[in-house]
Amino acid sequence: MNAKGIGISLNADMVNGDLEALEKHIGYIVDAGSDYVELIMHGLDVVIDGKVHPKRLERVRAVLAKFQVGYTMHLPYELNLMSLEKGDDYYRCFEAGIELSAALGCKTIVYHSSFAQLTEANMPQYYAKYGKLYREELFAILAEEDVKRLRELGLMAQRYGITIGIENNIWYDIKNEYTYGIRPQQVVEHIKRIGLDNVGMTLDIGHCYLTSIAYSYDFKQAIIDALPYVKHLHVHDNFGKLKDAKTYMSNLPYGYGDLHLPVGWGSIPYAEVFQWITSYTGIVNMEIEFRLYPHFQESVEEMKTLLAQK
């Protein structure tokens, strides 16, 4: 695979707006030999009330300038353009994320796919706006609105030369949550409807593995089908057990959930995965649980070996 480079993600909670922590943690990633650092927007404290704060931006930019490395940007995890209550606030935050990414030189933005919580308790709020509809009918309307919003945001990003990658996500319980984000092929269909070259997919291999087992779809075929639309790649390992004991310390001994382990620590067949996606030429970003930072360097070295295999 002729990848553009290897990245490692920061942890928003561990940075938590602390500029000294930001510098220290970027240092761990750079010292490991990574080519890119994936910033997490809500860990930087630069976007305040949907706007980029200029003084705070300069402080963060000064930290980033200390390192000879590229940057990508992950938007806040809870940002959800389908939210009935907060959708407008999230949209403004997305716009600010594009402006922030441009200011920091991030050419790739990651967005978790949208979803709607259609529970018995909140359906009346939707009825007031859209009329009384079945859940599937309502979700179809919300999905079209999401396409429209992402097209608008994609056009804004296009002016800055920025690509948006919509990420396939995981759901532990989908009884009342409607999304296009579980199966990569559904993310692709959403992207096709958006219809912009700079809006594609962030293919998360770890999420795909978990959900392919939990929701019974073909892991390999999903990756192959998504590949032509993939702009960015997230790699990390797990054991395919979509269970959650609520804390990392509780999940790890049992191999539960989205563990974000270094590649090779779980059961995802990454040697085969990389054979399936040899045509990919973007960044391979490792989302490793940051408490495992002492293993960053070996992870980068092992990733280079994997990527070099023919």
Image (tube, grey):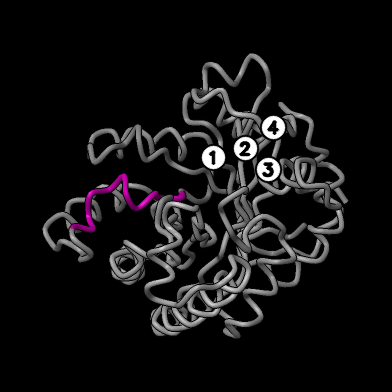
Q: Which mark is residue 238?
A: 4
Spatial CA distance of label 2 from label 4 is 18 Å
Is residue 44 covered in magenta? yes
User: Residues under labels 1 and 2: Cα distance?
Assistant: 7 Å
Q: Residue at label 1?
A: 33
Q: Are marks 2 and 4 in contact (CB under 8 Å)?
A: no
State the separation of the CA atoms marked 4 and 1.
Answer: 23 Å
How far apart in space, not on screen, are marks 4 and 3 (Cα)? 7 Å
Alpha-carbon span between mark 3 and mark 1: 22 Å
Name which of mark 1 and mark 2 comes first in the sequence.
1
Please name the amino acid that badge 4 sits on. Asn
Write down the quadrant of residue 1 in the picture: bottom right
Disc on res. 206: 3
Residue at numbered disc 2: 300
| Residue 221: % across, % down | 86, 58
Q: Residues within 10 Å of mark 1 (few under 14, many from 20)?
A: some
Q: Residue at x 41, y 63 (%)?
A: 124
Residue 109 is situated, as x and y percent measured from the top left of the image, at: 47, 63
Residue bounds of the magenta highlight: 38-48
Crowd rating for badge 3 (residues with CA inside 10 Å; few <14, some 14–19, many 20+): many
